[in-house]
């Protein structure tokens, strides 16, 4: 167990290093001169030279990378080119809003997904099953931003129940969280259904029913807990990908999170900020995945290194 | 691996791959995939011929009818500068098809190449390539695509390239997995034993046998590519105005959400129908070609 956790930490560390190389390389992969692109056509030679100096782009690549890494490890992600503020504080200012949105979305996704999955499995091959699974397929086909727009049209414009986008209060949170939750629930409901269908066909379920247990007890005490192992894994993986999904949703609802920041920084070609956000999201993603794997190995000790993600793909 | 003595199995006796020629028929027999195929054929026809039938120029503003409701003159209404939504939608179909072809080709070709190389050569090459893929997988797809657009600059072509590249890591992993499975199968070992060259094994044994898995995944990838490119356009990092692209149209429609419901409704329906049909088709293909993976 201890060895598994150590190995998982080590491989996570390698991936983290790789992400730092990727975010570092970002600015060097830009075709043409990034300084010129950032400063625009009319920049003078002095301005170009000064910024190049400031960003350290006149040094050898390897020196630059280690300097970058050293800075990052000290929490210095550079300075936003547009606002002149440290990139890290820009990010940390927006991050709580994104976490709030992603967490509420995840909560809704779990509630919706598991309910639909259990119902679909219990009433397999009936209309309920068919509708639940159609909704799941529809959920992966409808663009998230369009679903968001439709919800705004219905609940804000038509019914006037919820405020127009822009705030960060509870009432502002409802629509983006529902949008996110509905879309993320599709994977969960499919997996829950698959797991439940399998478990419900086992002998011990028949035994449980034969000894006269109520359907609720059979479903939730006997079947559900055994069907949940793959679902728990996917929920863990979803937490991280939800952070990606929020990007677009934030734009739809003008939610002031990391996603909006990422979009505006790319549009304004604020490369230090873009680099910082990519690095930050990558690190969060890896840490969450690592945590999920470790927690998972504690829940289900049979799991071993190398078996975790390959097993699901 | 335990299939008798490899030396006595001649190459002609190797395991027969899933027969691909019956697939179309099977897809046609299943009502769900039949309807989705019909819808997709119509979409392709519209993509090719739609612009000829478009009643108006998709970029021409009619200033006398701004934000006009759907009518006989403008079937699906007009937008904020009076452009005909129906014509824009028809032209947008072609853009969407282009996205599907271009982005998915990038993913398919590069991903297959990396995956097969990794599995076939193995050793250090495999480790290095897969570590790189792991690193790229650690960044959510859409963020990855955004990073690439940040590098290349916002445009429709760059968005397609970005979405194509962002899909590679997952695809390469999948190809590697299937290649490894085929590589260790009895018939490959057998033909290796009788001295078949690596190139022959790769082309005539591995490729045909991983194709069915790849076909399934490629179909599903089309849906993802269309959604992601539309998303990039929606946030302003893909197609630029006045290009009639569905994601861009939605983004413009969002601005007039309380005045003109039609602007944000029809492009969304179009995207959903196309992606939904592609996904149904992909699921059906998986049931036929690769029943284990479901």
Image (cartoon, rainbow, N blue to C red):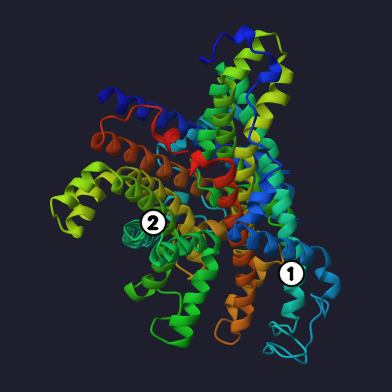
The part of the image, by quadrant, that contains residue A104 is bottom left
Residue placed furthest toward the right: B52
Query: Please, which chain is the residue tagged with disc 2 on?
Result: A
Q: Would you say B182 lies left or right of A279 here?
A: right
The one nearer the camera, A207 or A134, is A207
**Is residue A300 something one can see in this rendering?**
yes
Residue B216, position as x, y percentages in the image: 60, 44
| Residue in the image at 74% along x and 54% along y | B157
| Camera-nearest residue between A287 and A39 | A287
Dot 2: what SS? helix
Label 2 packing within 10 angstroms: few (<14), some (14-19), many (20+)? many
Residue A200 or residue A22, whichever sits in front = A200
* Residue where numbered disc 2 is placed: A189
Q: Nearer the viewer, mark 2 or mark 1?
A: 2
Question: Compared to A221, does B38 lie above or below?
Answer: below
Packing grade of label 1 (10 A; few <14, some 14-19, many >=20) is: many
The residue indicated by pointer 1 is: B244
Q: On the rendered structure, is B182 left or right of A180?
A: right
Residue B199: which numbered mark, if any?
none
Between residue A50 and residue B237, name the one nearer to us: B237
Q: Is residue A164 left or right of residue A266?
A: left
SS type, badge 1: loop
Residue at 47 percent of width and 50 percent of height? A87
| Residue in view at x 74 percent, y 47 percent | A45
Tell me if residue A116 comes above or below residue A66 in the rendering.
below
Placement of A254 over or under B123, stated as above or below: below
x and y percent of residue A273 in the render?
53, 51
The reply to whether discs 2 and 1 touch (Cβ–Cβ < 8 Å) is no
Question: In the image, residue B1 lies at what x, y percent?
Answer: 52, 16
* Whether labels 2 and 1 share one chain: no
Q: Is residue A249 left or right of residue B125?
A: left
């Amino acid at each position: 167990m201890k060895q598994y956790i150590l190995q998982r930490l080590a491989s996570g560390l390698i991936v983290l290093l790789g992400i730092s190389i990727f975010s570092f390389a970002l600015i060097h992969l830009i075709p043409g001169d990034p300084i010129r692109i950032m400063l625009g056509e009319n920049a003078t030679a002095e301005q170009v030279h000064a910024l190049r100096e400031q960003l350290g782009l006149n040094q050898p690549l390897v020196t630059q990378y280690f300097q970058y890494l050293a800075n990052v490890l000290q929490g210095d992600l550079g300075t936003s080119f547009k606002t002149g503020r440290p990139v890290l504080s820009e990010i940390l200012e927006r991050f709580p809003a994104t976490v709030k949105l992603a967490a509420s979305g995840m909560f809704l996704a779990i509630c919706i997904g598991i309910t639909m999955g259990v119902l679909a499995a219990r009433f397999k091959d009936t209309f309920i099953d068919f509708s639940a699974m159609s909704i799941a397929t529809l959920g992966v086909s409808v663009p998230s931003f369009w679903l968001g727009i439709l919800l705004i049209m219905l609940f804000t414009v038509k019914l006037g129940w919820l405020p127009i986008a822009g705030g960060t209060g509870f009432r502002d949170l409802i629509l983006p969280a529902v949008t996110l939750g509905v879309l993320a629930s599709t994977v969960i409901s499919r997996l829950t259904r698959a797991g439940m269908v399998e478990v419900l066909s086992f002998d011990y379920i028949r035994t449980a029913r034969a000894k006269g247990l109520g359907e609720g007890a059979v479903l939730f005490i006997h079947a559900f807990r055994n069907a949940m192992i793959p679902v728990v894994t996917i929920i863990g993986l979803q937490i991280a990908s939800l952070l990606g999904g929020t990007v677009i949703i934030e734009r739809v609802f003008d939610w002031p999170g990391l996603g909006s920041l990422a979009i505006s920084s790319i549009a304004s070609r604020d490369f230090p900020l873009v680099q910082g956000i990519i690095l930050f999201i990558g690190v969060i993603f890896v840490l969450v995945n690592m945590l999920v794997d470790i927690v998972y190995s504690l829940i289900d000790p049979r799991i071993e290194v190398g078996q975790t993600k390959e097993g699901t793909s | 691996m335990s299939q008798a003595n490899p030396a006595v199995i001649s190459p002609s006796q190797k395991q027969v791959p899933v027969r691909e020629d019956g697939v179309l028929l099977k897809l046609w027999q299943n009502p769900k995939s039949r309807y989705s195929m019909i819808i997709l054929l119509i979409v392709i026809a519209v993509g090719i011929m739609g612009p000829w039938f478009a009643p108006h120029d998709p970029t021409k503003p009619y200033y006398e009818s701004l934000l006009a409701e759907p009518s006989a003159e403008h079937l699906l209404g007009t937008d904020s500068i009076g452009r005909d939504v129906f014509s824009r939608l028809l032209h947008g179909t072609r853009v969407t098809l282009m996205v599907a072809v271009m982005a998915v080709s990038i993913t398919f070709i590069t991903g297959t190449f990396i995956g097969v190389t990794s599995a076939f050569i193995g050793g250090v090459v495999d480790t290095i390539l897969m570590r790189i893929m792991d690193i790229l997988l650690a960044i959510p797809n859409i963020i990855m695509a955004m990073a690439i657009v940040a590098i290349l600059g916002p445009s429709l072509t760059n968005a397609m390239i970005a979405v194509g590249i962002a899909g590679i890591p997952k695809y390469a992993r999948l190809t590697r997995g299937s290649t490894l499975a085929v590589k260790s199968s009895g018939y490959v070992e057998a033909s290796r034993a009788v001295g078949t060259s690596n190139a022959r094994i790769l082309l005539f044994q591995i490729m045909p046998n991983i194709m069915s898995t790849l076909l399934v995944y490629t179909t599903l990838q089309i849906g993802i590519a269309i959604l992601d490119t539309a998303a990039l356009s929606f946030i302003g990092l893909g197609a630029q105005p006045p290009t009639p692209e569905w994601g861009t149209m939605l983004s413009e429609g969002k601005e007039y959400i309380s005045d003109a419901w039609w602007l944000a409704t029809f492009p969304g329906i179009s995207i959903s129908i196309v992606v939904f049909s592609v996904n149904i088709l992909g699921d059906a293909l998986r049931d036929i070609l690769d029943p284990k993976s479901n």
